[in-house]
């Protein structure tokens, strides 16, 4: 995720979560969906949504109809603090550093999470972090798949010798991105494909950085609106397919 979770991030995760949970392939499943959005910090809006009296701290959305769903939003510091004892064991006995793997282990330890079906998604700086996380293969037991929106693909030169995600990864960018280089990302994806990586990039003509921002400033750009509609559909189908495959 981006550095701070705000109204934009909450809107995006709710839209994606509802779209996935309502997919017809899961219509007859008797399950409760749990989604998490984690970043460095929460702004005032996100903090207020996660501090409502009738919900556990951190729950920003909860429903029992038409789908049974809970969405959590927390900063990394809080997630790691809640998992402090396990983290201490890792650090002391395994010399393990806190990272995305720690967060995945935390989620899998929760009784309300299906540990075999956990997806990773990031936007902008969070997209870059997602790419990096998907390169650290955890013995085929990592995230089910990943969605990456308009990342910076230089990644501090870390993958100059090659990049290959351990699970299916999909990248979405606009050709008019004013903050990061679509050309560089396409080169990274093309090279990864050549090495056998399951990664695909969609480049939307005329779309800008943050093209899926629901605010009027971005969505009044026709290319952004078109890109958002297409990306949401592809993202929803992608996670639905990945989760369904793991359920079999």
Image (cartoon, rainbow, N blue to C red):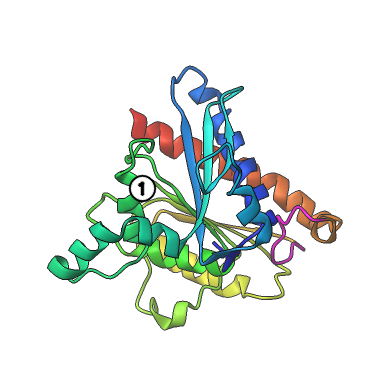
In the image, farthest residue toward the front: 53
Residue 19, image x, y percentages: 61, 35
Q: Could you say whether the residue bearing mark 1 is in a helix, strand or loop?
A: helix
Residue pictured at 55% horizontal, 65% vertical: 41
Residue pictured at 59% horizontal, 41% vertical: 53
Q: Is residue 196 visible?
A: no
Q: Quadrant of residue 101?
A: bottom left
- Front residue of this view, candidates 180 and 216: 216
The C terminus is located in which quarter? Answer: top left
Residue 197, image x, y percentages: 38, 58
Q: Is residue 46 left or right of residue 148?
A: right
Residue pictured at 37% horizontal, 61% vertical: 80
The N terminus is located in which quarter? Answer: bottom right
Which residue was labeled with disc 1? 107
Magenta-colored span: 206-215
- The answer to whether residue 236 is above or below residue 172 is above
Is residue 7 a member of the stretch shown in magenta? Answer: no
- Front residue of this view, candidates 45 and 178: 45
Residue 134, image x, y percentages: 38, 60
Residue 132, image x, y percentages: 41, 68
- Front residue of this view, candidates 33 and 211: 33
Q: Is residue 22 visible?
A: yes
In the image, farthest residue toward the bottom: 157
- The answer to whether residue 173 is above or below residue 177 is above
- Front residue of this view, candidates 71 and 23: 71
- The answer to whether residue 80 is above or below residue 168 is below
Is residue 211 a member of the stretch shown in magenta? Answer: yes
Q: Is residue 22 left or right of residue 199?
A: right
Q: Residues within 10 Å of mark 1 (few under 14, many from 20)?
A: many
């Amino acid at each position: 995720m981006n550095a701070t979770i705000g109204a934009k991030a909450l809107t995006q995760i709710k839209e994606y979560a509802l779209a996935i949970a309502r997919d017809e392939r899961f219509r007859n499943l008797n399950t409760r969906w749990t989604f998490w959005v984690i970043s460095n910090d929460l702004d005032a809006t996100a903090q207020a949504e996660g501090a409502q009296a009738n919900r556990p701290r951190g729950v920003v959305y909860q429903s029992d109809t038409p789908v049974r769903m809970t969405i959590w939003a927390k900063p990394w510091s809080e997630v790691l603090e809640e998992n402090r004892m396990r983290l201490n064991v890792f650090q002391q006995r395994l010399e393990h550093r806190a990272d995305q793997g720690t967060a995945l282990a935390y989620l899998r330890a929760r009784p309300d999470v299906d540990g075999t079906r956990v997806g990773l998604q990031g936007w902008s700086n969070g997209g870059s972090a997602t790419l990096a996380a998907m390169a650290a293969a955890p013995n085929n037991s990592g995230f089910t798949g990943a969605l990456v929106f308009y990342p910076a693909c230089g990644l501090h030169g870390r993958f100059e010798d090659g990049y290959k995600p351990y699970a299916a990864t999909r990248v979405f960018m606009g050709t008019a991105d004013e903050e990061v280089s679509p050309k560089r990302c396409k080169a990274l994806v093309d090279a990864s494909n050549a090495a056998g990586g399951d990664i695909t990039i969609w480049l939307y003509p005329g779309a800008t950085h943050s093209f899926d921002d629901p605010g009027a400033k971005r969505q009044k750009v026709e290319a952004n609106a078109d890109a958002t509609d297409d990306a949401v559909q592809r993202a929803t189908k992608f996670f639905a397919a990945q989760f369904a495959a793991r359920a079999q």
